[in-house]
């Protein structure tokens, strides 16, 4: 049985648009995963240190038969294949960042994984692409996505025109 999942993608190094396209291709090849759609691409200012390039962000919708931590392992393998080096510094530049935003209607809090993703409610570069994919989404706590959008203005992000994709 599969569950609907949403994955956040971000990159600000080594041709970020190509990094996201390559990550989507890798996701589409994962066993036990069916990639459904990708939001438009957005540019956003970096969190944390400002002396780094702007980010390109997107969200993908997929159906996963993998358990949450197995999906996390697969995402981290894709990051590594695309040159991601994990450092102690948080929010630094990176070739690729893949985050599980939502995994079905589950709330997960383990040492390795927190779902819904930590602070996604305050990140327009996550919420607005997510709303493109499912404007009527309800969070695991019962709050509609539209409530989160109303509390998080679309500031600091710019959509890249005509960049959404459907994979069904």
Image (cartoon, rainbow, N blue to C red):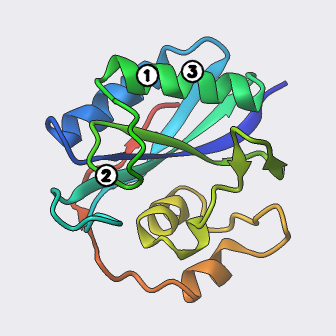
> Are the residues at dot 1 and dot 3 in contact (C-beta closer than 8 Å)?
yes
- Circle 3 residues within 10 Å: few <14, some 14–19, many ≥20: some
Q: Residue furthest front?
A: 88
Q: Is residue 105 visible?
A: no
Q: For the point 54% across and 44% down, which residue is it? A: 99
Q: Nearer the viewer, mark 1 or mark 2?
A: 2
Residue 54 percent across, percent down from the top left: 20, 60
Question: Whole-Å distance between the Cαs marked 1 and 2?
Answer: 18 Å
Vertical side of 128 occupied by 154: above or below: below
Which label sits on residue 92? Answer: 2
Q: Earlier in the sequence, mark 3 or mark 2?
A: 3
Q: Earlier in the sequence, mark 1 or mark 2?
A: 1
> On the picture, is 49 further left or further right than 10?
left
Vertical side of 60 occupied by 142: above or below: below
Q: Nearer the viewer, mark 3 or mark 2?
A: 2
> On the picture, is 93 further left or further right than 121?
left
Q: Is residue 126 visible?
A: yes
- Camera-side residue: 75 or 146? 75
Question: Whole-Å distance between the Cαs marked 3 and 2?
Answer: 22 Å
- Camera-side residue: 39 or 8? 8
- The quarter of the picture where residue 21 lies is top left
Question: Whole-Å distance between the Cαs marked 1 and 3?
Answer: 6 Å
- Circle 1 residues within 10 Å: few <14, some 14–19, many ≥20: many
From the image, tell me which residue sits under label 3.
Answer: 74
- The quarter of the picture where residue 166 lies is top left
In terms of secondary structure, where does tag 3 sit? helix
- Circle 2 residues within 10 Å: few <14, some 14–19, many ≥20: some
Q: For the point 26% across and 48% down, which residue is it? A: 93
Residue 32 percent across, percent down from the top left: 67, 16
> On the picture, is 39 further left or further right than 22?
right
- The quarter of the picture where residue 112 lies is top right
From the image, tell me which residue sits under label 1.
Answer: 78
């Amino acid at each position: 049985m599969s569950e609907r999942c949403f994955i956040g993608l971000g990159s600000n190094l080594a041709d970020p648009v190509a990094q996201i396209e390559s990550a989507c291709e890798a996701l589409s090849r994962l066993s036990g995963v069916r990639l459904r759609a990708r939001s438009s691409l957005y540019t956003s200012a970096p969190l944390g240190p400002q002396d780094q390039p702007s980010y390109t962000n997107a969200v993908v919708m997929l159906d996963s038969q993998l358990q949450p931590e197995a999906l996390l392992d697969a995402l981290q393998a894709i990051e590594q294949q695309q040159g991601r080096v994990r450092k102690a510094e948080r929010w630094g530049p990176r070739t690729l960042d893949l985050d599980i935003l939502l995994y079905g209607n589950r709330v997960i809090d383990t040492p390795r994984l927190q779902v819904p993703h930590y602070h996604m409610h305050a990140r327009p570069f996550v919420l607005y692409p997510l709303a493109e994919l499912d404007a009527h989404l309800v969070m695991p706590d019962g709050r509609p996505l539209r409530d989160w959008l109303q509390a998080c203005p679309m500031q600091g992000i710019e959509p890249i025109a005509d960049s959404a994709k459907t994979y069904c």
